Image (cartoon, rainbow, N blue to C red):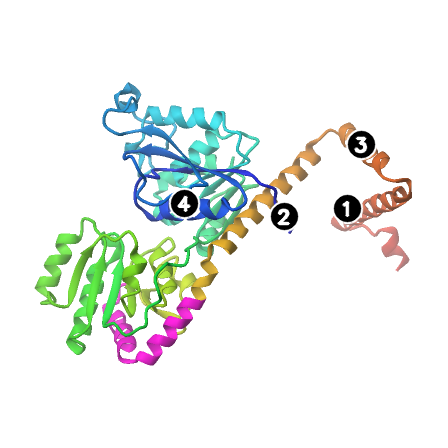
Amino acid sequence: MKALKALKVVFLLHNAFGVGGTIRTTLNLASALADRHHVTVVSLMRHREVPRFAVDPRVTLVPLVDLRAGSADAADPRLAEPARAFPSAEGRHRQYSRLHDVRAKEYLRDCDADVIIGTRPGLNVYLARFGPPGALRIAQEHLRHDAHNKKLRAQLEPHYRKLDALVTITDADAAVYRARMELPGVRVLAVPNMVPAPSVAPSDGTAKVVAAAGRLVPGKRFDLLVRAFAVVAERHPDWRLRIYGGGPQKEPLRELIDDLGLGGHVELMGVRSAIEAEFAKASVVASASDAESFGMTLVEAMRCGVPVVSTDCPLGPAEIITDGRDGRLVPRGDADALAKALIELIEDPALRRAMGAAALEGARRFDPAPIAARHERLFAELRSARRRLAWRRAPARARKWVRSRVGRMLPPALRPVLRRARAAVGRGRARGAADRAGRPTARTKAH
């Protein structure tokens, strides 16, 4: 592919100053693209002085609404008015206001970017409504199609039709969007999240530790994992389960651990922003989720040379883990199968190390360079498609004038080549038209 010239790329992010998977993956991609492009991250919110995640110094960070106490925005009466442009069925709607609508519209109206990428449904709607028509407008979906309720999907569809592309993070989810959302002319494809190599050494597979990480919410099914580990602890009391994360299920999980008598076997470790350092201290990582839009923690574990035992839930794990090679996939909601897979790896150190080595190798497909290259190819293809569409829509007189100018600019020796090429194209179009009409051409008659 011809090298893409440096572009102005803008990301729209809910809150670059917070913590979360979408924030981390967006900043990773922004950093990778900054090797060759001018990148800006626009944060709709700002609630603290410094972002929790490191922002590449080559990336410009632009907050639109300052929510810090004492700021001018905090006293703006529009902050108390509900948002009108942000979709009402979006999960973050209550956090948006009329001031957010106005700031987003003003920024996008004056934006001179070549590419603008939204990173959640409501921001994708802002992009569709206010984005400059000259820029490529790309929606990213970090949640599954089926994670959106019916009302939100209905609100999104007419806006998504105005975009150039919709990018999901799994092939399975892209297929769902193609089947269930009518988006004529919109490119729908999957590009996985990038996960940079950690700065810690890989696990040696000897620690008697199983690790797990994520928000302590019902859908992550840490309760199922704790019940499965009760079976593990009975056979291998010297092994420990460490659960990293915070959330509303913390106290119910603590009660479950006490009820099952696992106080000395299962530990709730709290939040760790650099989870790779903790995964590198484990020999197995486990996930019991009912659903995953991707599964960042699975890749992060594999990048530390740790095999993962995960439920085969929609949509991400099966596109990350190769069952029996670099980890194990077990039926969703099955505590016995989860326990059995964990025990298999615990009792077979050689298998554990072999799977860890395969995980480390397989995770390289999520390196920043190849993922950034896939985005660059998408930019180039969308720009090319736009040029072809503009050419087809141009008046016939304008196209004729351009062709004549091109012909006069060529050296005389090359003009016959151009005429022959045009003639060949004309014959090809004639044959194509005849084929579509079911009529024989002069060439087919001769045969």
The dot on residue 27 is: 4
Q: Which residues are magenta?
A: 333-361
Distance of label 2 from label 4 (alpha carbons): 23 Å
User: Disc 1 or 2, which lies upstream in sequence?
Assistant: 2
Q: Confirm whether the magenta stretch covers residue 268.
A: no
Q: Residues within 10 Å of mark 2 (few under 14, many from 20)?
A: few
| 271, 444: nearer the viewer | 271
Residue beneath label 2, please? 3
Tell me the amino acid under the disc marked 1: Ala
| 123, 204: nearer the viewer | 204
> Percent position (x, y) of residue 293?
37, 53
> Percent position (x, y) of residue 445?
88, 55
Residue beneath label 3, please? 400
> Percent position (x, y) of residue 52?
30, 43
Residue beneath label 1, please? 433
> Percent position (x, y) of residue 292?
34, 55
Instruction: Determine whether the residue tagged by mark 4 lies in a helix, strand or loop.
Output: helix
Residue at 77% x, 30% y: name it: 396
User: Disc 2 or 4, which lies upstream in sequence?
Assistant: 2
Between marks 1 and 2 in the image, the one whose residue lies nearer the viewer:
2
- Image: 258 above or below 32: below
User: Disc 2 or 3, which lies upstream in sequence?
Assistant: 2
Residue at 44% x, 40% y: name it: 59
